[in-house]
Image (cartoon, grey):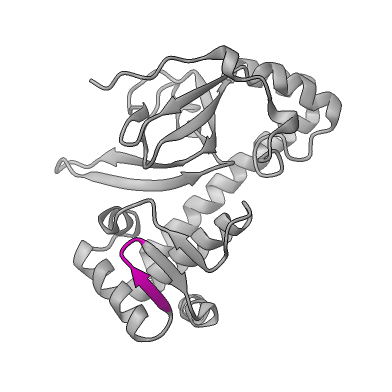
Amino acid sequence: MTTQPPIRPDSFKVACSSCSLRELCLPVGLNSHDLEHLDTLVATRRSVARGDQLFRSGDAFQSLYAVRTGFFKTCVTAEDGRDQVTGFQMAGELLGLDGIGTDRHTVDAVALEDSQVCVIPFEELERLSREFNNLQHQFHRIMSREIVRDHGVMLLLGSMRAEERLAAFLLNLTQRLQARGFSGTSLILRMTREEIGSYLGLKLETVSRTFSKFQDDGLLEVKQRQITIIDQAGLQQLVNGATC
């Protein structure tokens, strides 16, 4: 059984109001008065080592977690015992929304690299949301964003060929990274090709073959996990062709 690192309340001296991710995370759009209340809500950070679980399917739901640094995957165990990846989360995104409906988590959240999250007790978040309309509105926006993302994945799995699925995945990943100040054309994949295949509904061999084809076609330069997008318009054309 994986043990969680101890929570260190004294490590959270600087809160949401001065966090570099506040324009991507829960505080976006909040005024300084509301941010002060959110600062008191987000009282702790938790470190999660690479390969460790932040929470498991079946765990009691108590908190949401804002990714401060690092990268996570969420997954469920299929009937045949294999892990099915349901999403990838990076800095500024929330984990734990899966537990709201049933008061228990329905997925495992696993760190793909050494990571750190801000712990947001859900009962306190609900209480503050009732008092501050801006916070409630932002929380609803985040939930809506997750629903839209889920619909996007359904579109990927339901109507796109392998090349189109991988192109859409890479474009989405680079757009999210660019919003966080990283390069929009160069990235290091934190997930394995097998995990990408699980998320996109593709076999490992298909993912590897498609990466090779993209490189042969001059769309990408691939060096193990380091990816450089050479022809972003070409990738976008693949995706646009799938949605016509």
* Start-end of magenta stretch: 220-225
Residue drawn at point x = 41 percent, y = 36 percent:
114
Q: Residue furthest bottom?
A: 217
Q: Is residue 224 magenta?
A: yes
Residue drawn at point x = 57 percent, y = 65 percent:
184
Quadrant placement of the N terminus = top left
The answer to whether residue 161 is seen in the rendering is no
In the drawing, does residue 125 fall left or right of residue 188?
Answer: right
Q: Is residue 3 magenta?
A: no
Instruction: Give percent across and percent down for residue 175.
Output: 57, 61
Please name whichever residue, 68 or 35, is drawn nearer the observer in this view of the structure: 68
Look at the magenta stretch and give its main secondary structure. Answer: strand
In the drawing, does residue 180 fall left or right of residue 81?
Answer: right
Instruction: Give percent across and percent down for residue 156.
Output: 41, 64
Residue drawn at point x = 30 percent, y = 39 percent:
76
Residue 153's place in the image compared with 113, above or below, is below
The answer to which quarter of the image holds residue 115 is top left
Residue drawn at point x = 37 percent, y = 86 percent:
217
Residue 134's place in the image compared with 131, above or below, is below
Please name whichever residue, 63 or 191, is drawn nearer the observer in this view of the structure: 191
Instruction: Give percent across and percent down for residue 243.
Output: 50, 75
Residue 175's place in the image compared with 84, above or below, is below
In the drawing, does residue 1 fall left or right of residue 219?
Answer: left
Residue 146's place in the image compared with 47, above or below, is below
- Disc tally is 0
